Amino acid sequence: MRVEWDGRALELVKPMLVSKLLEHFSLSNETHLVIVNGRLVTEDQKIGKDDEVKFVRVVSGG
Amino acid sequence: MKCRVCGQPANINLKAYNTALCAEDFISFLENRVLHTIKKYHLIEDGDIPVVAVSGGKDSLSLWHIMNKLGYGADGIYIHLGIGEYSDISLTKIQHMADTLKRKVYIFNVHDLFRKGIDELARAMRRPPCSACGMVKRYIMNRVCIDKGYTVLVTGHNIDDEASALFGNLLYWKREYLWKKNMVLHGIEGHLSKKVKPLFLCSEREMAAYAILCNIDYIYEECPFSVDAKSLVYKGMLNKLEELSPGTKIRFLKGYVKMVKEEVEERDYCAICGYPSYGGKCNFCRLLERFKIQGNIYFEEHGACNLDSPQRMVT
Ligand SMILES: [Zn+2]
Ligand SMILES: [Zn+2]
């Protein structure tokens, strides 16, 4: 799978659950949304090896 | 996970509400919460003419979109701070939203008036950029309301902004600021407009999800000056508590709203412009005087020439 996060792009081979992927990057469900193939998904969604994943940061500085 | 309303695959899990929802049902759920907040806490009432402070970020653009969708026809105000590309991109996104909503947006350009961007202005004032920015924004937003006849200034502060600020004020017992975190701050006829925060009970996560699901094109980048290290730490801590015990942030703010009382401050009014001030002149008029700037404050207006706005609300 291809993971895009704050302008960086990474490749991961192993399919996994969204919750595991967040853990892998030490991200919290409260602070990041996960978009898979253009669709907002919940943590129990499985991500396959050909999927495109994007993290959206939700916390702003002000 | 399945949507609790329709059984379709869910797009978002809302632990604080012990529910998961699909895109469509989440959109109505969030809009209903905003509507409920506006009505229950009397944010906007019959006869009010609202205007939304827009920054180009997810919260204010979504709020502007929601208000107009809910029937609270509102124009916008944008303060162009002259922070390079960041301000220009924000403006483009705001103009695009104004065109979509067929509403007007007032644009105040800091550089046009002061011949300086906000960073240079802050240096000249010997203040941090965020403090100078806050002072200019508060003044100009109020000025638009008073000059153009809007009765209520609507801002996009969300539960995370408010809970973290309240937490900071409690931690250091800044008693004089405590009541100012409320979702309604009443105005003073002819001097100060009423201010309200309809997203007071909506989280940043929900607002980002709403913007994504409604295809609202917002500026993702942060203002290069706005990253307040302390407020980010507070937000992080509150989010940790939220993870351990979903609903904590809502309970914290709802409890606060129940117990807090608006206080009346002893104030003078600026002899030049009428803005509340301590001493004879307000900070903004002092600033103009210092840079020898004379004449009227000018707002550019974009969009909605076909409407007779401002419009008085009938709710
Ligand atoms: Zn549904
Ligand atoms: Zn003044």
Image (spheres, coloured by chain):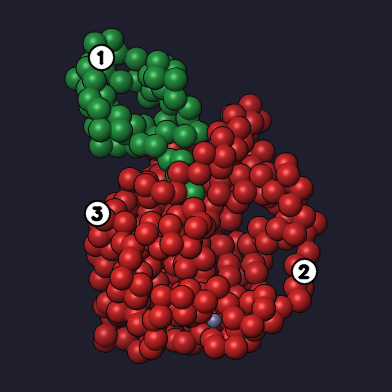
| Residue drawn at 66 percent across, 44 percent down | B168
Residue B31 in the image: state x and y as whole percent: 48, 58
Q: Quadrant of residue B69?
A: bottom left
The answer to which of B273 and B97 lies nearer the viewer is: B273
From the image, tell me which residue sits under label 3. B85
In the image, taking residue B80 as reference, residue B36 lies left or right, namely: right
User: What chain is colored green?
Assistant: A
**Discs 2 and 1 carry the same chain letter:** no
| Residue drawn at 29 percent across, 53 percent down | B86
Above-or-below relation of B30 to B140: above
Q: Chain of mark 2?
A: B
From the image, tell me which residue sits under label 1. A12
Q: Quadrant of residue B11?
A: top left
> How crowded is the residue under tag 2: few (<14 C-alpha within 10 Å), some, or many (20+)?
few
- Label 1 to label 3, Cα distance in Å? 34 Å
From the image, tell me which residue sits under label 2. B263
> How crowded is the residue under tag 1: few (<14 C-alpha within 10 Å), some, or many (20+)?
few
- Observer-side mark, 2 or 1, equals 2
Q: Which mark is residue B176?
A: none
Residue B206 in the image: state x and y as whole percent: 47, 45
State which tag comes first along the sequence, 3 or 2: 3
> How crowded is the residue under tag 3: few (<14 C-alpha within 10 Å), some, or many (20+)?
few
SS for dot 2: loop
Residue B188 in the image: state x and y as whole percent: 65, 82
The answer to which of A58 and B167 lies nearer the viewer is: B167
User: What chain is colored red?
Assistant: B
**Discs 1 and 3 carry the same chain letter:** no
Q: Is residue B92 among what the camera can see?
A: yes
Above-or-below relation of B249 to B292: above
- Label 3 to label 2, Cα distance in Å? 40 Å
- Amino acid of disc 1: Leu
- Label 2 to label 1, Cα distance in Å? 56 Å
